[in-house]
Amino acid sequence: MTKEQELVNVSPERLHELIQNKLEAAGLPEEQAKVTADHLVYANLVGVDSHGAVRVDYYAERISKGGITLNPELRFEKTGESTGIFHGDNAQGHYVVQQALPHIIKMAKDTGLAAVGVRQVGHTGTLSYYVRQIAREGLIVISMTNSDPMVVPFGGAEVYYGTNPIAFSAPRANGHEPLVFDMATTVQAWGKILDARSRGKDIPQGWAVDENGNDTTDPHAVAGLLPIAGPKGYGLMMMVDMLSAVLLGLPFGKHVSSMYNKLEEGRDLGHFFIVLDPNRFVGLDQFTQGVEQTIEELHQIKPAEGFDKIYYPGELSLVRYENNIKNGLDIPKNIMDYLESDTVHFDQYGNKGPFAE
């Protein structure tokens, strides 16, 4: 058993200030630091703590060591009426994707479809942050990104693919926030292991294996993650890798750079968006009516024993968001101590493997 960490309650505004200040201290320009802090606080607000404040020390170390292009040359290359590539110049991933969104949204509204890759970026964080913004424009979106090899493929004893997440979002009617769900193609994302480490908690069985390929509940012993539903998750992570890496001419599979190795270099990750305008099909009004009917019917389903309500996929994130806005965020004390300190980073990630402490 690991020792559970004390939690500190903090307002979203204060957390944002601390994160932005730390990223600027590491050398990230003010606007890029603000955009990144926006994203990280959002992750904590929706309950994806694995992609929130826990990541700041790592980002600060990579920025400080030169692995992020601080003054990037970003450009959108239109490769067809409904296709394009946004070139990220290995800048801060959250900032790059945020700059790509207006181009993607415009293309989808102009032509009814946008299939756009974002290439050469660092870690881009929580996909739901981006797809939610696109759906607020009355568009339907699927997004995905590749990551470094951390997953034992079905039937294998060595890692090959990354956690390779997929996100989906659709607009709703009557002023409701979009329907959004965001998932790794592993049983849990690597960031969940990091969060368990920071909180001093064990992980459930079935999430990961140790160096001998045996199931482990110790987050510090993880040497490989497991795909969701065995061969089905394995197939999904391959699809993500093909679209967000192979299609964009980027390193793929086991060739993707480790998050923690060579912090002085860019990571060359890829991100892919497929965006549809429902007005080119059934129409936005009828589509959103169908979404509302789906949600209403899901809510009316009789709960199984041990459950009090049926939620649509991703709904609990919205519930957490509203609760955390009202009550503040509970952040591990060790993370808050770091954010409030004068330390820029702890120099603990460089030249380590993907499962670095």
Image: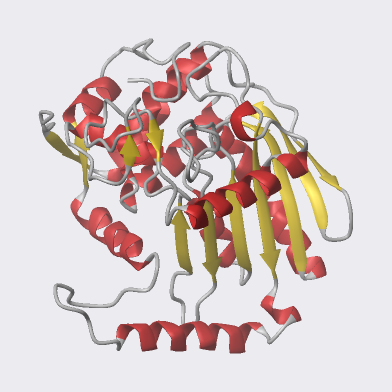
Q: 196 or 118, which is in the foreground?
A: 196
- Relative image position of residue 167 (x, y in whole percent): 52, 57
- Residue at the outermost front position: 155
Tell whether 119 sits left or right of 77.
Answer: left
Q: Quadrant of the N terminus?
A: top left
- Quarter holding residue 279: bottom right
- Relative image position of residue 3 (x, y in whole percent): 10, 28
| Residue found at x 24% / y 30% | 198
| Residue found at x 45% / y 54% | 183
- Relative image position of residue 163 (x, y in whole percent): 48, 42
| In the rendered image, the vertical position of residue 83 relative to residue 283, given as above or below | above
| Residue found at x 82% / y 68% | 111
Tell whether 154 sits left or right of 266.
Answer: left
- Residue at the outermost right position: 80
| Residue found at x 48% / y 11% | 351
Tell whether 238 sits left or right of 202.
Answer: right
Q: Quadrant of the C terminus?
A: top left
- Relative image position of residue 165 (x, y in whole percent): 51, 49
| In the rendered image, the vertical position of residue 342 relative to residue 209, given as above or below | above
The number of discs equals 0
